[in-house]
Image (tube, coloured by chain):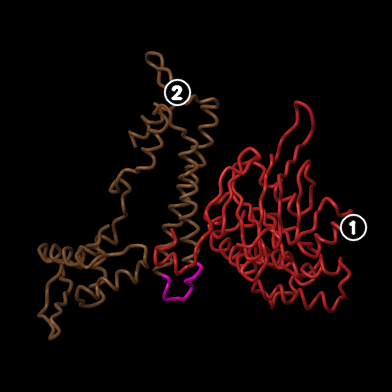
Chain colours: A red, B brown
Amino acid sequence: MSGPDDAVLELRAVHRTHGAGPAAVHALRGVSLVVRPGELVAVMGPSGSGKSTLLALAGGLDRPTRGDVRVEGQLLGALDRRGLAQLRRRRIGYIFQQLNLLASLSALENVALPLELDGVGGRRARAAALAALTEVGLPALGDRFPDQLSGGQQQRVAIARALVGERRLVLADEPTGALDSQTGEAVLHLLRRRVDAGAAGILVTHEARYAGWADRVVFLRDGVLVDTTAPLGSVEQLLSGSDR
Amino acid sequence: MSIRHGLLALLERGQMYGYQLRAAFEESTGSTWPLNIGQVYTTLSRLERDGLVRPLPESEAGQRPYEITDAGRADLALWFATPISRNDRPRDELAIKLALALTTPGVDVRSVVQAQRSATMRTLQELTRLKYGSDRPEDLPWRLVLDSMVFQAEAEVRWLDHCETSLVRHQPNRPTSPPPRPPDGGTSDGARWADEEARR
């Protein structure tokens, strides 16, 4: 088994406390987690257990009160604002329940936007955006505006935007929230495929059916990781029953 | 179910002998419901006794095919038309186990819930991986069987989450020593839960 050197994401003894004194809320209490390339980890737990805090810390959207967060070996706490913003734009993809697509931009422009913000030239950004739209099965709908797309198609565009370019860490927060079960599965298919191609992923979900797509499921309660499932074997091992 | 109705449904496609039936049954349900040849022959002889199938002359290779009778067809049509009743299924051992865990001194119910949830979640992951690996059109019957098991496992995880939340709400400082006897006429939450489970 490889060491944490090749980890895409590493959280080490991470604490996150909001407020101080007796009114302090301990959102996370000493959470450690390593996610490697090709690994999708699902995070489950009741409301208020710290799932979204964990995701925000992993994505550099929030800073831990104590402990270290590293993405591809880079200690997020050691980066200045500009460095952190750059890492977020280039290496981390976010998929939220709220799609946050810009209504005045076409699907292709929405997907190309993070690259253009990062200084990538228009033509290259559009080519990468088209590749991402192709990856999610919408190569022909790049000219459409969000209000001309179905809910499922909009979610795919949002996923393409999260995957565009060289993102090695994909963070998904209840990405199947408002979707029917077939469309929800399609979203997990896309996430799974990108992870199988070498990215690392974290999926926060309260639906066990979707967590089933992960290689490992961790359970959070009151800010503490209380349990984790054992790694899965191959399909052949599962079919032969020799995996246990 | 009934392996009976499974075999009748397969014979509705055409006559088959025992090994063919077993292979076709497993093809329909993937590896989720392995069937041994003894079960197939026992079931066939009961179906024959009830007039739902009839044996045909043995082939030169010594295999005896069976065909479905009109009575068998009627029985099969009735099965497809009748919803499955949950009351027909055996009692849920897990629910009973948790109810007993709540009222048995010295049992850490949260650990029981967590261990079960991890195991069920793991099953769910395995089922999902099998499903992910089978997306050919001819895999559809198997995928639907897997889906059924996925949804059942999901329901179990949700129920376990619910149990955990209920435990936190009703027994914030549950002692691990024998609980005090409830006052006359009253019942503890655990006992009440056990009562409800028993009534299910």
Q: Position of residue A238 (x, y in %)?
A: 44, 64
For the point 73% across and 34% down, which residue is it? A25
Find the residue positioned furthest to the top.
B184
- How many numbered discs? 2
Height in image: A139 above or below B83?
below
Q: Mark 2 points at which residue?
A: B177
Q: Which circle, 1 or 2, is nearer the viewer?
A: 2
Q: Distance between the residues labelled 1 and 2?
A: 57 Å
Query: Label 2 sits on what residue type?
Result: Ser
Residue A178, how many percent across, how many down?
62, 55
- Name the residue rendered at 85%, 61% in the picture: A86
Disc on res. B66 = none
Tag 2, which chain?
B
**Residue nearer the viewer, B115 or A3:** A3
Magenta stretch contains residue B133 = yes
Q: Quadrant of residue A236?
A: bottom left
Specify the label residue A82 is tagged with.
1
Q: Is residue A164 magenta?
A: no
Measured along the vertical axis of the image, is residue B74 above or below residue A141? Answer: above
In this image, A204 relative to A142: left or right?
Answer: left
Query: Which chain is indicated by disc 1?
Result: A
Which span of residues is magenta-colored?
Answer: B132-140
SS state under label 1: helix
Helix, strand or loop status at disc 2: loop
